[in-house]
Image (cartoon, rainbow, N blue to C red):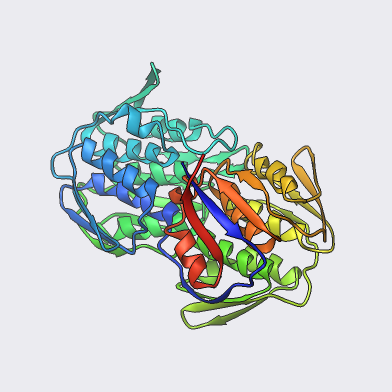
Amino acid sequence: MDSFLIHGGTPLYGDVQIGGSKNAVLPIMAATLLTAETCVIRRVPDLSDVRFMVKILESLGAEVHFAGGTLTIRASAIQGFGDYELIRKMRGSICILGPLVARLQTATVSLPGGCIIGTRPIDLHLKGLAALGAKLTIDSGYIRAEAPRLKGAIIFLGGRAGPTVLGTANILMAATLADGVTLIESAACEPEVVDLANFLSSMGAKISGIGSPTLTVTGVEELHGTDHEVIGDRIEAGTFAAAAAATGGEVVLHGARPEHLTAVLDKLHEAGVRAERTQGALTIKAGSALRPVDVTTMPYPGFPTDMQAQLMTLMCLASGTSVITERIFESRFMHAAELMRLGADISIEGPSAIVKGGRPLSGAPVMASDLRASAALVIAGLAGRGDTRVNRVYHLDRGYEKMEEKLRRLGAKIERVDGE
């Protein structure tokens, strides 16, 4: 397994291009199963998760071509039985369930996997599909859904930690081909859901309320092919912003969408980091000293759970005490122990991490536990003194395209090596 070797202490300066959103493109890829016509998706990041989804679509019978950041998908003749080994490895693969049962009236897929960051049940996915008329059974690790024809319904998708993003995507896709009108209440409002809704609309779906907690979907007989460009990845942008701030540098994020980063930019401003918006770019400038902040993760437009780990690293460098409360996933503090290996002072009290910052970080071998934790450890290594080895960076490859190359262009001393 690959590792990153990082020699820290060098401020990041320069320009970086933010890629397409991983969390947007995976459901959009699943949505191509709703039509027999060709769909073209542009600005697609070359990530292991995207490659996994390509294999899943191909296993269903779709023709897929991926080159130069463009995906061309034609699902003219597909089957409703997904590959167990492929699907169980990636959480986002659950998004094929709704499109398959909507188009083929039947679907059998394995229960999905993904990062180990707490329980992420799919009960709301199943609740929504059942409300649309699907008969569901779970047996031997498979979910089987059958419905001669889905029918519109009123569906509430609020969960214990707020609206479900993937659940909203799944039910939204299924509803596009259902008879009648579907009303999705407590729908997720994330930009990635908006991007999916816009993609479906360009295929001929009838959706109103896009970007709001209430989505109204009027089913149509069929959808057609389309050409779509994926939105920029707000979490990649936030990660590079945190890296610039942590190292005391200045970085221009091209392709970032500030309107998708309001909560993150607000906390960076509170911490003493400057952000300047220009046409098509966002410039992040480190202040003279970092200040501690308190933050609670929340559904969009609140502070994203996918930026919690990166902010924790930043707060390790701020003089004072910060309180970071995780309300989305109950087991998303595994990076705290690894940050402590680098010299951080962090204590966990229930859903909160108490970070006593201001102590310098120093290099050490650390272990990446999940995608965003990996990014946090890379930022810590860049900001710390000496050499840091981040092991098992295959997690990073799920969500950041050529991260080490982008960082090197900003002046970072980082290399990928064979490792544990």
Q: Residue furthest right?
A: 320
Foreground of the two, 279 or 130: 279
Foreground of the two, 187 or 275: 275
| Residue 33, above or below 268 | above
Q: Residue furthest left?
A: 77
Residue at screen point 44% across, 48% down: 398
Q: Residue 165, how many percent across, how many down?
A: 49, 46
**Would residue 397 be visible to someone looking at this image?**
yes
**Would residue 217 be visible to someone looking at this image?**
no
Q: State the count of labels.
A: 0
Residue at screen point 69% across, 56% down: 313
Q: Residue 140, how many percent across, how many down?
A: 38, 16
Residue 158 as seen in the image, left or right of residue 125: right
Foreground of the two, 28 or 15: 15
| Residue 228, above or below 330 | below
Residue 405 as seen in the image, left or right of residue 61: right
Q: Residue furthest top?
A: 140
Foreground of the two, 244 or 114: 244
Q: Residue 401, how many percent across, how many down?
A: 42, 58
Residue at screen point 72% across, 50% down: 342
